[in-house]
Amino acid sequence: MSTEVAPRKKRLAPYIAAAVGVVVIAFLVVLAVSSPNESTVSSSPLLGQPAPEVKSTTIEDQPFDLSRRRGSWVVFNFFNSTCVPCRQEHPYLLSFYDNQATAPTPAELYTIVNDDTDGAVEAYFEANGGAWEKVRDDDGAISVAFGVAKVPETWIIDPNGFVRLRILGALTENFLDEQLTRLQQEFEGAQ
């Protein structure tokens, strides 16, 4: 009886291996055709609420206090220099920053450094550009307050200090500009 089982197992093994191979190939195809750079607007209990208190320092050792930014649109981009999607979205942040220099109601852009060293962040921005402020989040309190799941994540805060938008994942071209313009128009219409 045991001699019948062994040949049957040998006949089944190639079929099981083939099925596993098909599943692996299908998974790789899904990964290859999916777009990892899609910006996604996401819900959060913070939307429409006052922004969490943020007091820290920049990597240049200057004080940073979000409450002192009242009257300005503020964009927080949570970042880590080793994060691949953060690197992919960087050209779009550079473009956004440049566009804000000539915008009628410019927004202030801040990088919130997530679990990274000052030296690594400085080296990244020296090599890739980006003249905006980089704010330390040494103990992770800012990330926790905003409920950041993983970087990159981008938040927009209105001039009254209320959270208006949360964007998960890497930004795509012009997405941040479009979302900010829409929010500014809604804000001006409500005034």
Image (spheres, helix red, strand yellow):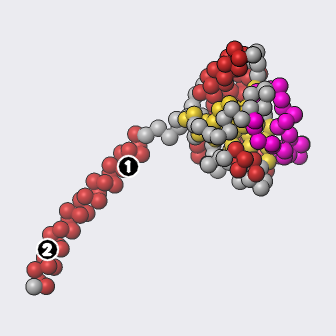
Taking the image as drawn, is residue 129 in sight?
Answer: no
Disc nearer the start of the sequence (1/2): 2
Q: Determine the image quadrant of residue 124.
A: top right
For badge 1, the amino acid type reads Leu
Q: What element carries label 1?
A: helix
Residue 185 % position (x, y): 67, 17
- Residue that badge 2 annotates: 8
Magenta stretch holds residue 51: yes
Residue 9 % position (x, y): 18, 74
Q: How many marks?
A: 2
- Residue that badge 1 annotates: 28
* Label annotation for residue 72: none
The residue located at (13%, 85%) in the rendering is 2
Q: Is mark 2 on a helix, strand or loop?
A: helix
**Going by the image, does 64 lie left or right of 115?**
right
The residue located at (20%, 65%) in the rendering is 14
